[in-house]
Image: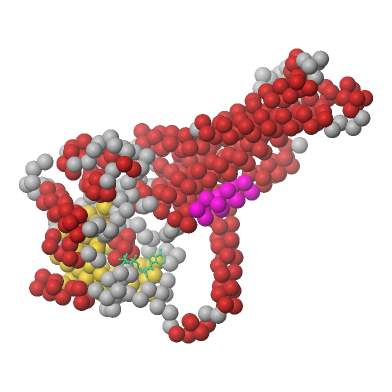
Amino acid sequence: MSDEPNPQRSTTSLKIVDLEIHVSDRTLIAQTNVEIAAGKITVIVGGSGAGKSVLLRTLAGLLPSAGDTIRWTGRIEFGSDHHSRQTNSFANHRVGIVFQQFALFDELTPIENVQFAIDHRTDRKKPKLQSAGEWLDELGVPKWAPVSGLSGGQKQRLAIARTLAADPDVLLYDEPTSGLDAASGRKVAELIRQTQTSHRRTSIVVTHDYDTLLPIADEVLLLDSIEQRLIAVPQQEWGKIPERMQPVQVGGRDRSDDAKNTIVTRVIETTKQYVDSFFVVTGSAIVAAVRLPAQLWPAVPNLRWGLRFVLHYFRLVGGPSAWVYVILAGLIIGFTSTYFTFRFLPFRSYTQPLLIDELLASIGFALYRILVPILATILIAARCGAAVSADVGVKRYGGQVDALKTLGVPPRAYLLLPIVIAFVVATPMLEWMAYRAATMMSLFTFVSNHPEIGPYYWQQHFFRNLTSTQSRLFIGWGWVLGKNVLCGFGTAAIAYYRGMSKKDSASEVSRAITSTVLWTTLYVLVVHFIVALFEF
Ligand SMILES: Nc1ncnc2c1ncn2[C@@H]1O[C@H](COP(=O)(O)OP(=O)(O)OP(=O)(O)O)[C@@H](O)[C@H]1O
């Protein structure tokens, strides 16, 4: 790739108009008006806690203006030589982010990560830019190695390649040197400068590491936590920046807080938080199930990638480890239902010969219509719900969900829809496996205990209440399928929405998994209870 600036590259500038950002009761930015120059590197510096990450997420269009804790007002306008000014045109995903934690798709190879970005470019009419392989060659990233095996530097270069491949006009770098030693930090700064020279974008670097990143800056903005504003710093004053970067006293309580903070107050506060969180979780689980049908039809941007995600979730929900799980459950219930029904029969030696055929027919019916569906769907809800909630929760916490959004993909298209499809297909499939295992075990148990009667007798009576001459399908198959689909649908919704809820720490991921198990199993029990009222 040549070092010549690309002449047709973006000259998009960014104008921040009347921007105010509040976090809870605190003002991070008050009434700021700033223009960010087109085609240059602008470094935004600020002390710890000043609000750099929140600002970056606002500029990227990742924060709703009226969020639960973060609220912002004002406008972000994009201007260019070719387009008239547009307000908040995030939908065109003209802003790409190189995330601090890279937010790469771990289940894809490096070349697929870049191809994903290329396949979701909005402006498909543009002359073909570099291929995924060319991007990786240029940035020196192995094409096929597993992402988890890449070094930190390779991951960062891959993140830059993926972001550039999406062809954004504005490129945001989130703390690109954080956690690096001085030498590695300088290499990253050099890489940003080279990328800028070769692919001339409007680059915005958000950092507290002014030492490393000021040398590559064309412009500097200071996020001043005392004035609560973004202030342009002229080059002759860059040397004074360290003095002006005040760390923020986060959560600065006034003194009366300490007085109030007795044990009793803390107990009340904690209890209140638990109760609040219980209602929030309950509410969101119910809302999730109710609003699912309306949410389910996002336009899938690319069918091939859509199928890829369906396969990923199908493996997670209905893969071989789930088979083992449900087959074992089927074997256990097949054995217990058959063995103990005969074992504890009152006056067994008299009653058994009279009742044996009726009992077999009842066991067959109960296993098919009630026992196996309940057991299998509860196990699927717990195991697969937890697996999916963990997968989505990690994507949310690791920033992949934000990466999807900045690449122009609604998460519902590649997460929610594939998850629902996976559950709706896999639940009946797994339940059927459990049922087959249960019937085989029932046959084996019966024949072992009644060798004189034999398998033909079992066969004749076990299915008696389930078969009719009119149909080759079992009687009541519609009810069984309906229960499976309802359970799969709701489990998918709860697992997705619990996974997608706000995640600021790894422990929130694990809490989401636990609450998914609780709510999905409860949901499944309620479904079986309600359906049983109509079914029988
Ligand atoms: N999701 C959130 N919920 C509640 N408060 C938040 C949230 N995100 C950020 N904050 C608060 O907003 C303030 C600014 O946070 P931010 O992460 O933007 O700071 P920063 O300048 O990037 O700091 P650092 O350089 O230390 O990462 C902090 O006080 C933080 O606690």
Quadrant in the picture for the N terminus: top left
Residue with the most extreme left position:
4
Instruction: Locate residue 127: give its quadrant.
Output: top left
Identify the residue shown where x is 48% and y is 37%.
316
Q: How is the image coloured?
A: secondary structure
Is residue 347 or residue 163 the one in the foreground?
347
Q: Report the image quarter containing ligand 1.
A: bottom left
Identify the residue shown where x is 41% and y is 37%.
309
Is residue 129 or residue 451 the one in the foreground?
451
397 lies above or below 302: below
Identify the residue shown where x is 43% and y is 67%.
69
Is 128 on the left or on the right of 402, as rendered?
A: left
Image position, residue 368 (x, y; %) = 70, 30
Judged by its main secondary structure, the magenta piece is helix
Image position, residue 383 (x, y; %) = 56, 42
Is residue 490 or residue 249 the one in the foreground?
249
Q: Can residue 186 be seen in the rendering of this structure? A: yes
Give the magenta-colored segment's residue range: 510-522
Quadrant in the picture for the C terminus: top right
